[in-house]
Image (cartoon, rainbow, N blue to C red):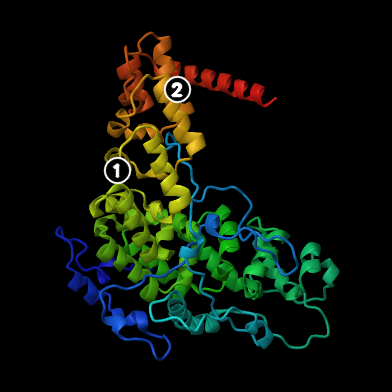
Amino acid sequence: MAVFSICAFIPALRSQSGPSPELLRSRFPLHSLSRGTEEGVDRRSASSRRFVVLSTHSNPRILKVNRKSRHGRPLSPFDSDDDDESVEFDEDEDEDEDDWSDEDEFAEIAEYEVQNKDKKKKDRWRQPNKGWRSGSLSSRQQNDHHEYKNQVRNAVNTFPTPDHKNEIASYNVTGRGKQKEIKPCQCGFPILSEEIDLDVRWIPLLDYLCTFGLKETHFLQMYERHMPSLQINVGSAKERLDYLLSIGVKNRDVKRILLRQPQILEYTVENNLKSHVAFLMGLGIPNSRIGQIIAAAPSLFSYSVENSLKPTVRYLVEEVGIKEKDLGKVVQLSPQILVQRIDVSWNTRYLFLSKELGAPRDSVVKMVTKHPQLLHYSIDDGLLPRINFLRSIGMCNSDILKVLTSLTQVLSLSLEDNLKPKYKYLINELHNEVRSLTKYPTYLSLSLDQRIRPRHRFLVSLKKAPNGPFPLSYFVPTDECFCEQRAGTSLEKYLAFRQKLLLKDFAKKCEKQR
């Protein structure tokens, strides 16, 4: 498999001083952004340095939850299982994963034309708006659409539609086997048959997808999201999913990927999947993390590498100011950044932090580099309430800026379940001052039940707790270092104490709920 190097579009990757804007622009020709747009577009936008990077965000928390199917049933576009979707964090970190997202700042997933002789089905697909200017969301989607539609049209293997006197039975998992008669009532999908006009020629694919844990309700979601995905030949679908599994996608994640991006069954391995994987590897992302990124943002396959993904990277480097060596880290922390409308997200949040806290540009860039999820959080429901909370406990703007620059993930923590309980424990139990948080902001990211309370009470029980305010530095080291340097006892003794304390706290909570 060919490996795509980021040097192809950022030649100064190894440069210590960083590339010049002229050099980067030479590798990212702006004229490619306006290719495929409608006539009458103002070409002056192609020569301007500023441009709009448009994509979609695939995080389930930002999509509308009140969507209904054409049958009147509530429709959830994603898997109902509560699996971890985000990047793995340290087990000691207690982070709320709410994204506080603004729905209007993300583009729709680009639709692709699929080989289908039924014109009525084609007419059902959503058409892009024609009134947008070059660089807009609609034109970017049209660019991606025109680039791939011929590849997808030629590559997708859908079933033919001749007149059959008898119903056709399902093939085996490889798409081969004898055909035999089958009755619709014997297809094994009674619920699906009642809800939609189920073609028995879809059954081989459905049987195969069931091996990944998909059920009839999931197929209904796939049908409503993108019906042609159920018309794919099972052999072609197996080839594409086998490739995803071979590059690190976990078997349990296939169901979630298909529910969020069923079109992935139509994308060919050679012309689409491999080129996007090569792009990710070119950013410096290790092979071991490719599968996790795809599971978190499967919609990236629906966007052109040349017309969407590369311009996004260029915007992050040129306009935002993220260093080239940090690109891989940023994408691993938040894969959705590649498919987000990054220009709107960056500008609105930079202006907000600059006005609200007087944050200089380099401080905001540090925040985005350390915690790119910041670009997903809503200002009104996410950023502002947490900033106001820090103000309410006595922090000035400069102290808040120090905390956020050092530990930006504070903006993702729940007020009621994280920040407020830790603040109360800091004041009432540790007898510490709020200003100590500016020196040890990590305190706010640590688990109150798993680390802060057990270590404090363990030292109190050993009569080794310092007099006066309890030092927050005691919570920073690992359990082994804490036991050796502060408690002077074995790790086993501390773990036993913590387990006993957790059981007591759990019993108290159960009594309160009665």
| Mark 2 Cα-neighbour bin, 10 Å: few <14, some 14–19, many ≥20 | some
Q: Are marks 1 and 2 in contact (CB under 8 Å)?
A: no
- What residue is shown at x 30% (from left), y 31% (from top)? 440
Q: Position of residue 138 (x, y in %)?
A: 47, 77
Label 1 element class? helix
Label 2 element class? helix
Quarter of the image holding residue 89? top left
Q: Is residue 435 above or below residue 329?
A: above
Residue hosting label 1: 401
Considering depth in this image, is 189 or 118 the residue closer to the camera? Answer: 118
Distance of mark 1 from mark 2, alpha carbons?
A: 27 Å
Q: Position of residue 260 (x, y in %)?
A: 57, 62
Amino acid type, mark 1: Leu
Residue hosting label 2: 453
| Mark 1 Cα-neighbour bin, 10 Å: few <14, some 14–19, many ≥20 | many
Q: Position of residue 442 (x, y in %)?
A: 35, 34
